[in-house]
Image: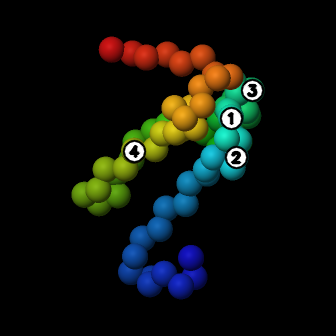
Amino acid sequence: MGEVHPSIPLLCLCGNHDVGNRPTASSIETFKQDFGDDYFGFWVDKMKGVVINSNVYFDPTEVRLFIFC
């Protein structure tokens, strides 16, 4: 990150290596205790950012999913 020009804002987020490639309810709960929500939105100036736990979508085997309509 030290080579990125100082005028370019950076946002560092925790990634899949923090919950494993096959998340479990336990690993997600540990992640939330350590880092906060595993999905959220935020604004930076005029840009809207959305963060999701995409590992749950790729391998939901060990995690119960709730879909809200």
Q: Secondary structure at mark 2?
A: helix
Q: Amino acid at mark 3?
A: Ser
Q: For this view, does 42 lie left or right of residue 30?
A: left
How crowded is the residue under tag 1: few (<14 C-alpha within 10 Å), some, or many (20+)? some
Tag 2 residue: 18
User: Which residue is drawn at the image coordinates 45% and 82% (left, top)?
Assistant: 6
**On residue 50, which mark appears?**
4
**On residue 22, which mark appears?**
1
Would you place residue 16 above or below residue 44 in this image? above
Question: Which badge, 2 or 4, is on the more N-terminal residue?
Answer: 2
Q: Amino acid at mark 2?
A: Asp
Question: Which badge, 4 or 3, is on the more N-terminal residue?
Answer: 3
Q: Amino acid at mark 1?
A: Arg
Question: Which badge, 1 or 4, is on the more N-terminal residue?
Answer: 1
Where is residue 34? Give x, y as percent: 71, 42
User: Which residue is drawn at the image coordinates 52% and 39% (left, top)?
Assistant: 54
Which of the image's four quarters has the C terminus?
A: top left
Q: Nearer the viewer, mark 1 or mark 4?
A: 1
**On residue 26, which mark appears?**
3
Q: Amino acid at mark 4?
A: Val
Residue 23's quadrant in the figure?
top right
Q: Nearer the viewer, mark 1 or mark 2?
A: 1
In this view, the residue in front, 24 or 39, is: 24
Where is residue 35? Give x, y as percent: 65, 44
Q: Secondary structure at mark 4?
A: strand
Where is residue 30? Give x, y as percent: 73, 34
- The reply to whether the C-beta atoms of the residues labelled 1 and 4 are less than 8 Å apart is no
